[in-house]
Amino acid sequence: MKPVESTIAAKSSNFLGQNPHLSELSESEGLPGFDTQHPPDPKLIDTCVHCGFCLSTCPSYRVIGKEMDSPRGRIYLMDAIANGEAPLAEGTVEHFDTCLGCLACVSTCPSGVQYDKLLAATRPQVERNYERSLGDRLIRSLIFNLFPYPNRLRPLLVPLYLYQKLGIPKLVRQTGLLKKISPRLAAMESILPNITGEFFKGNYPDVIPAQGEKRYRVGMLLGCVQRLFFNPVNEATVRVLTANGCEVVIPKGQGCCAALPAHQGQEEQAQAIARQMIDSFEGTEVDFIIINAAGCGHTLKEYGHILQDDPNYRDKAQSFANQVKDVQEFLAMVGLTAKLSPLTEGKLTLVYQDACHLLHGQKISQQPRQILKQIPGVELKEPMDAALCCGSAGVYNMLQPEVSEELGQQKVQNLLNTGAELIASPNPGCALQIQKHLQLAGKDILLMHPMELLDLSIRGVRLK
């Protein structure tokens, strides 16, 4: 055995010994473990030297405070399961479930540990080889059979609109009854946006011409949650792109980007959705494919990995991924040509909230700030712990509401402490999470997508 392997094996054994529940499980025979379909790569596991640099930046570890709920601890578990020293069972799966997948540890790690790839390999293993409880299966079935499908979500807008207009949410939250019945359903209900007439729009032409000289022909994704709950963001994005010389193509056949199932290990569903997305853009002859949601963009850029075993789509998936650009990344790259006007009479102080899958997943941090600073009169503030997750993390705030609550409170307090008049958030999940905790804190502060701010600036519309 190599020295590094020996050290890791010893540390893994010691780690398991400190956790009696896992130690007892490891003594049984025929442990359920990883199957042969892309298990976590031992070479990637071995790159972790267990230095602990990841601990301070890991949101789940900061809230829960347990070693196994940190990247280092989870890598121990992956190694132990791979070596038959621990099972893929409740005692281990719970620690993989507490991971937000925010990838802050990837940005922090001095050894370059690719925890993102390890997590992406582990979660499908969990879903294939571990039988969840009935309650867990039911809530996950609801989430993954509803949220990635806009045509299933759309019919719910009317009853949700009536639910809010009749004042039922206030009654539900004051009594706490739903939270007692199901904390997860209560968490789902608590992040509902205020349904307005804007939610019932969203019919776009297939092609929207550029204003003035055409510089680029770009495809645009509408998203699933984004197109229903944040349609004004999509409308603003189209106007910004066309005002800056882009012809915008919006294929009718597009659906979800696959982020929600992909991040939670729902491999077959993610692959099916990715194929549909690729097919919908085939033949559009676009220069780039633009997305305005951070989590979606990260997944779209991973299509080559998601469809790596599909001989019919492997190459097409990688070509598709190579065309994907976050809208802020794209605009910073090609430059703004439209004239920008002030959003207020005087100075406007705003704070930009870094979405994890933009900052850590796509390494996009300066571009959004560069764009926002081009708006006349804007003064950008920086929050404490800017790289710490807000607790939304796709559907994490519905599956792990307790941890998510604490992270949401911390994020909102850090944003408020900047004294900014407005929060700019580039991701729908983050926006819902932050808006919820602003309301709980009794703070009435504007929260907008950077594209909404750019759109108002281009059109010369002042903030109210």
Image: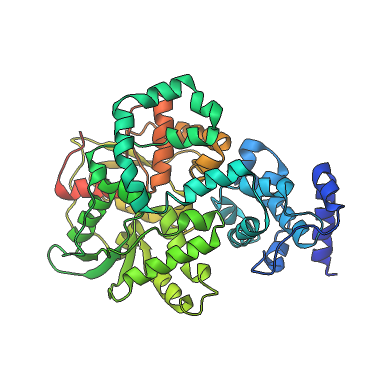
Along the line of sight, the residue nearer the viewer: 356 or 320: 320
| Quadrant assignment, res 119 | bottom right
- State the image coordinates of residue 131 (x, y, percent, origin top left): 66, 51
Display colour scheme: rainbow
Q: Is 177 left, or right, of 133 in this rendering? A: left
x then y, percent, for residue 158:
29, 39
Q: Is residue 239 left or right of residue 363?
A: left
Give the side of residue 117 with respect to residue 14, left or right: left
Q: Nearer the viewer, residue 180 or 119?
A: 180
Residue reaching furthest to the left? 212
In the rendered view of the protein, which quadrant contains the N terminus? bottom right
Judge by depth and name the residue closer to the eye, 153 or 375. 153
Q: Is residue 262 above or below residue 314?
A: above
Q: Quadrant of residue 240?
A: bottom left
Quarter of the C terminus within the rendering: top left
Is there any visible trace of residue 70 in the rendered image? no
Q: Residue drawn at (18%, 58%), measured in percent from left and top?
A: 243
User: Number of numbered discs present?
Assistant: 0
Note whether 213 is above or below 241 in the view shown.
below
Rendering coords of residue 125 (x, y %): 64, 60
Question: Residue 208 in the image: x percent, y percent?
Answer: 18, 63
**Residue at horizontal 80 percent and vertical 54 percent from the top:** 12
Q: Residue at x 22, y 49 (%)?
A: 455
Q: Judge whether residue 200 can be spotted in this image.
A: yes
The answer to which image quadrant residue 55 occupies is top right
